Structures are given as C-alpha cells and as structure tokens.
Image: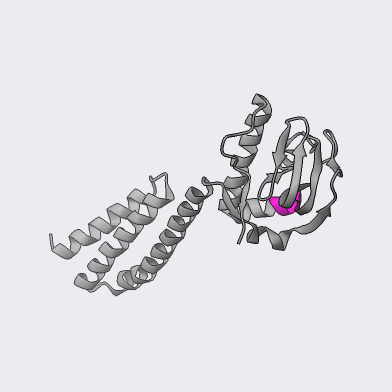
Amino acid sequence: MQLSELFGYLGAFLTLATFSMKTMLHLRIAGIVANLAFITYGLTAGVHPVLMLHLTLLPLNVWRLRQLLALTREIRSASSGAVSVDWLKPFSRQRSVHSGEVLFRQGDEATEVLFVLSGRFRAVEADVALRPGEVFGELGLLSRGHRRTQTVVCEEAGALLCIAYDEVRQLYFQNPKFGFFFLELAAERLMRDASGRMPSTPAGVLRAR
C-alpha cells in the first residue's frame, strides 16, 4: 500500500467518524483533520477532484470552528452576569419615573422587562432594593398567564429602559450571551423569592459603557 493511499483511508475513516460524534466541536476538529488528509492524498496521488473539494471544505470547517469557539467564550462570559446596556438600547424605550410611583402590582399583566438606569426602586413583597444596573420584571415572561410576581415602587426618582417581551424573545435567540444571562437571572430571582433572601451576587447587573 502506498503512502498516498494511507492518507486517503485516514481521511475516509475520519469522515465516517464524524457521523457518530455527538458534539459539534469534535465534529469540526475531525472534519479539519480529514480535509488535511484528503488534501495530502489528492496531492500525492494526483486525484484533483478530491483535492479541489477538500481545499474548498477546509476553510469552511475552520471558519465554523472559529464561530463555535467564539460562541463558547460568549457563553462562559455570560456566567459573570455582566451584560452591556448597549445591546439593549436599540430594542428599548426610556421611561422617567417619579418618587412614590407604583410601576406595577403583584398579579398585574406583565408585558416588559425593566432595567434601572438611575434612581432606586423596591420589590415590595421580597423587600429588595433595585438600584442602577439591575434588571427586574423578567419572571412575568416565564410565569403562567404572564402576571407580575412582585409589586415594584419607585423610592427615588430615576429612569428605566423598558423592553417588551417580544423583543426579549428575539434577543434570547439572537444573542447566546444574553440568553444565558436571562436564564441565570430568572433562576436567581426564583431562588430569592423561594428563600426570601437577596442573592449574595445578583445576576441582574448590566455593564454600562
């Protein structure tokens, strides 16, 4: 058996192996190695159709692998709980709130998530202060019937960013980092409401730029 044939068989084996792989990361890596094996086979054996095919597939697999690694970094970054408010501005409207104003009451219909830009607010039933950079109102999106789980009042005049639930759904699917942030935020809110305590490290914090 010639050396060129060994590369051909190696490429074929790796291509076959990709069909049994359960993760995209390993599939892309195996695909890249298979491309390199077939390129070597095509060069040494003079099989030009195989050579041209894998010269085309190699940069595609490398590009997809880079995308996958970038997505993995974004997901890991989401666990820090830091989300840029710049992402949200195109999807939101700003609202000024006066001291003493009741934003909504427990059981009211829920239609949007709110982000504190300035001022101070309080979730009455949980007795939790909401300060600049924090997020609230997200549980209404997850609750049955989309109802508010807390009464929120303004203790110090300020401003909010308001994002409709339809926009939140779009962000959730379009931006993986926001999606994981939203899941962690909702989970911590549920734990807080169940225990009656504020989490030691709130997930609902935005990073301003």
Q: Is residue 55 above or below residue 134?
A: below
* Residue at figure coordinates x 39%, y 66% from the top left: 57
Residue 181 locus on image (x, y percent):
59, 46
* Residue at figure coordinates x 64%, y 50% from the top left: 172
Work out which quarter of the rendered image holds the N terminus and state it. bottom left
Q: Is residue 163 magenta?
A: yes
Residue 111 can be seen in this image: no
Q: Is residue 125 above or below residue 170?
A: above
Residue 194 locus on image (x, y percent):
66, 26
Image-based side of 72 in relation to 173, left or right: left
Query: What stretch of residues is rendered in magenta?
Result: 162-168
* Residue at figure coordinates x 82%, y 55% from the top left: 96
Residue 198 locus on image (x, y percent):
64, 33
Image-based side of 74 in relation to 145, left or right: left
Residue toward you, 31 or 117: 117
Identity of the residue furthest to the left in this view? 1
Image quadrant in which you'd find residue 136? top right
Q: Is residue 150 magenta?
A: no
* Residue at figure coordinates x 50%, y 54% from the top left: 74
Residue 113 can be seen in this image: yes
